[in-house]
Image (spheres, rainbow, N blue to C red):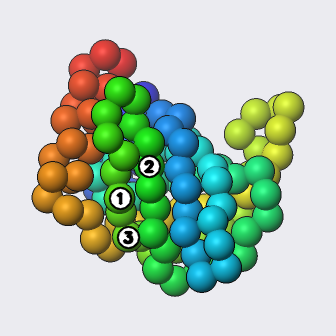
Amino acid sequence: MVLGIKRRGQPRAKVKWPVQIQTTRGSIYGVTTNISTSGAHIFCQEPSQVEGKLRLTIEVPHRRSLIIVAMVVWQTVSTPNESSSGFGIGVKFAHISADDRQLLQSLLAKHFERN
């Protein structure tokens, strides 16, 4: 499914990829709910007061992990479905290596072809 094309400029894919968020206070674990080559929405079960730059390790299926430096754009209490609630974090990618960007673009292109 393509989300937010007009507002964000990049199509977002609905994917659930595990994410480790490294902050100055330790690691927080979550999952992407949607992602593009420029940013993502991450859902976390545990409360998080994150701000500024974060280091993300995103586990993509059957591939190596993506390492991305991202800036927090917004945070909110989030409910991805009726059975669970948690916290949503919107991030904009600040630095992603050329190899990781190419892998992400390839994965997203395959996702959009299938959906």
> Dot 2 corresponds to which residue?
58
User: Can you give x and y, in whole percent of width and height, for residue 9 in the image?
Assistant: 29, 56
User: Can you give x and y, in whole percent of width and height, for residue 33 in the image?
Assistant: 55, 42
Q: Residue at x 55, y 63 (%)?
A: 21
First in residue order: circle 2 vs circle 1: 2
Would you say the residues marked 2 and 1 are in contact, meaning their CB atoms lie under 8 Å apart? no
Secondary structure found at label 3? strand
Write down the quadrant of residue 107 in the picture.
top left
Disc 1: CA contacts within 10 A as few (<14), some (14-19) or many (>=20)? some
Label drawn at residue 69: 3
The amino acid at mark 1 is Ile
The amino acid at mark 2 is Ile
Find the residue positioned furthest to the top.
114
Q: Quadrant of the N terminus?
A: top left
> Dot 1 corresponds to which residue?
67
Q: Is residue 28 above or below residue 115?
A: below
Q: Quadrant of the C terminus?
A: top left
First in residue order: circle 3 vs circle 2: 2
Disc 2: CA contacts within 10 A as few (<14), some (14-19) or many (>=20)? some
Q: Gap between marks 2 and 1, in whole Å? A: 7 Å
User: Can you give x and y, in whole percent of width and height, for residue 59 in the image?
Assistant: 44, 42
